[in-house]
């Protein structure tokens, strides 16, 4: 910048550019400052402030570390089952049923969710229920070839804090003698449709001590229920703790 300023102003600014600042690290700055200072008058700050990216990292890195610590803590809690983690429920529920030793239909078995429990009873299934399903809604698709609909009633009593929903927490499936599993998901196709009678998934939330009853409807291979070793499985959708019931 050249020239002089009118009378009354501070002394004329120096002509030209300020002297070149030395290369290398300036005092108090963690990175080298090179080049020449710009022309200018009072108030010119040199060297400039650190890039905004550096200031963002000051709070971003600790935040990421905190999130990582929370994730690690949650996983550790889940895996330390002997100390009360959610994976401990499988052997704390008192449920001793198995495919080889299923509970009888009409009896109650307790299965655990994280922090609460469901007392579950499986009623007598209605096998070969194609007519029942068709009467509920004529728009229902017929069972796939070689299969027949089954409607199984489920009664569940909730024990725990706040509230829960049996339709969300409980997953019902039929396990054939060969070990193949069939459930509601097996009928969820792009163009499929099924509305069974009084579905469990439409029941309302319940609070401690309350009981709900609803049906689960899907298709299984024709006659599979009569094969030795065929069973029903009612499992908690979140912990996997499940109770086996006889097919008949």
Image (tube, rainbow, N blue to C red):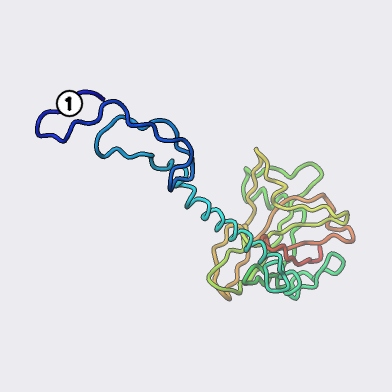
Location of residue 102 with respect to 141 vertically, above or below: below
Left or right of residue 31, residue 73 in this image? right
Of the pair 148 and 174, the residue shown nearer to us = 174
Name the quadrant containing residue 245: bottom right
Q: Residue furthest right?
A: 228
Viewed as shown, does residue 5 lie left or right of 225?
Answer: left
Q: Quadrant of the N terminus?
A: top left
Instruction: Measuring from the top left, give residue 136's x and y in whole percent.
Output: 63, 51
Count of numbered marks: 1
Q: Residue at x 17, y 34 (%)?
A: 11
Pick the front one: 54 or 180: 54
Query: Whole-percent x and y of residue 203?
Result: 57, 61
Q: Residue at x 74, y 65 (%)?
A: 242
Q: Does 49 sit above or below residue 7?
A: below
Residue carrying label 1: 4
Residue 237 visible = yes
Q: Which residue is farthest top?
A: 3
Identify the residue at horizontal 68%, vertical 41% (top origin): 189
Q: Is residue 198 visible?
A: no
Residue 192, position as x, y percentages in the image? 66, 41
Spot occupied by residue 175 in the image (x, y as percentages of width and height): 81, 57
In the image, farthest residue toward the left = 8
Residue in the foreground of this view, choosing between 178 and 73: 73
Left or right: residue 135 compared with residue 107: left
């Amino acid at each position: 910048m050249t020239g002089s300023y009118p009378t009354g102003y501070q002394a004329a600014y120096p002509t030209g550019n300020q002297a070149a600042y030395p290369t290398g690290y300036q005092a108090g700055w963690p990175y080298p400052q090179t080049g020449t200072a710009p022309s200018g008058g009072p108030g010119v700050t040199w060297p400039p402030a650190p890039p905004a990216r550096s200031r963002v990292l000051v709070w971003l890195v600790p935040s990421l570390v905190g999130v990582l610590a929370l994730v690690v803590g949650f996983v550790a809690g889940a895996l330390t089952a002997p100390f009360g983690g959610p994976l401990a429920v499988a052997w704390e529920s008192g449920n001793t049923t198995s495919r080889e030793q299923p509970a009888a239909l009409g009896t109650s078995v307790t299965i655990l969710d994280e922090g609460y429990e469901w007392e579950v009873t499986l009623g007598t299934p209605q096998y070969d229920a194609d007519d029942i399903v068709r009467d509920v809604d004529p728009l229902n698709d017929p069972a796939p070839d070689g299969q027949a609909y089954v409607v199984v009633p489920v009664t569940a009593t909730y024990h725990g804090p706040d509230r829960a929903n049996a339709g969300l927490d409980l997953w019902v499936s039929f396990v054939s003698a060969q070990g193949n599993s069939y459930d509601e998901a097996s009928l969820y196709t792009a163009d499929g449709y099924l509305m069974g009678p009084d579905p469990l998934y439409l029941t309302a939330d319940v609070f401690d001590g309350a009981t709900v009853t609803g049906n689960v409807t899907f298709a299984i291979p024709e006659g599979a229920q009569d094969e030795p070793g065929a069973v029903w499985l009612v499992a908690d959708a979140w912990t996997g703790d499940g109770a086996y019931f006889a097919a008949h």
